[in-house]
Amino acid sequence: MVEIAILGFGVVGSGTAEVLTENKALIEERLGCEYHIRYILDLREFPDSPFASRIVHDFNVILNDPEVSVVAEMMGGAHPAYDFTKACLEAGKSVVTSNKEVVSTFGDELCRIAREHGARYLFEASVGGGIPVIRPMINDLCSNRIRRISGILNGTTNYILTSMRDAGTSFADALHEAQRRGYAEANPAADINGIDSARKIAILAALATGKLADPTTIHTEGISAITTDDVNLAGMFGYTVKLIAYAEALEDDRLLTFVAPRLVPLSNPLSRIDDVFNGILICANMVGEVMFYGPGAGKLPTASAVVADIIDAIMNPAEKAKPIVWTRAQARELADFSAYSCRRMLVFHGEVPTEFSGFETRRSGDSIAVLTDAATEEQADGWNQTYGDALLSAYRVL
């Protein structure tokens, strides 16, 4: 009998208990053994829940119980989730998690602790919700050098941008509707400012390169300044606006990562990822491009990924599993973002400056956009300084 503990009984935690209960017979048949949810840690009481008798409020009850071998952490936030995870791994208990903040901030350390104590640290649900992407990167793409990752990693922002494009909704109205539908938090800052996507691309880039970049150092832009005119102009050029998390392993082995709204060509499969769905496009040197698509959030999709990790931890103990080895990315291993070069869409008020005469333009209301040749971030900053308020917005082309 495998004894499992759940840390946090919110949306994903309760979903995990539901999946483990609803599909118990199926999972046990595939495992070849029985399991039992022994404890659920939460500060609250749940008197009407079928799991009410398993609620505990003291983490040490779980930590000090030698029968508990797998812990599922869905608390959210950095602390005490990190502290509890570290303690469990040091006690030889495997930990699975959906907590991208902890994985992206402390993943190198926690993977090392897991290796040292004969435990496993698994985090499939930390990126892409119910989309299987982390395990395929570890196992199925291990014979490849991963060159680039481009991803729509946040369902909230993707829903907002889809609404702005298809319904002509303003950013503010689309955000309000996302909150009404439960797609956005009451405080949506981590989503709309790109922070959530930065944490996720840090994890994917670490899987690709073995180097974990501090997500707070990743160049990150959000979507709150995007207007319906911008979205319309992008469409006139044959693009759609998406919040893209991007990572690239450069030829000199340095890592380039950033998050920003980008113009995605309609020929790119990411252009067709709409509403709350996520999509991840990986380019590797042998297989070429592979695409992962599906629900990027939600109670049961995310819980499905958590339970997949629980099954993996039970079936493949540390001595049989492929270890995850990450190192903390040093400054010298990170590319200079100012040198990044791509085509740009510049949106001006009134008329396009003579510097851009001869380039293709489109107009929407009082705004006119020009599609430039490739330019570096340094050049783009120069345009901002030169044209000031006349340059309403600028977008990178994917």
Image (cartoon, rainbow, N blue to C red):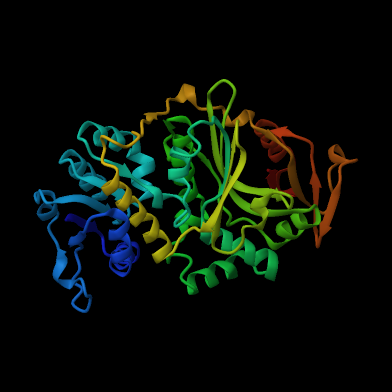
Quarter of the figure that contains the C terminus: top right
Q: Is residue 39 visible?
A: no
> From the viewer's perspective, is residue 179 above or below residue 363?
below
Farthest residue, direction bottom: 48
Task: Provide residue 394's location: percent of width, then percent of height.
Answer: 69, 46
Identity of the residue drawn at 49% across and 38% down: 218
Task: Provide residue 257's location: percent of width, then percent of height.
Answer: 54, 36
Task: Provide residue 289's location: percent of width, then percent of height.
Answer: 62, 41
Quarter of the figure that contains the N terminus: bottom left
- Residue 29 located left or right of residue 168: left
Number of numbered markers: 0
- Residue 392 located left or right of residue 207: right
- Between 117 and 169, the one lying in front of the other is 117
Identity of the residue drawn at 26% across and 54% down: 32
Q: Quadrant of residue 120?
A: top left
Task: Provide residue 359's location: percent of width, then percent of height.
Answer: 87, 42
- Between 127 and 17, the one lying in front of the other is 17
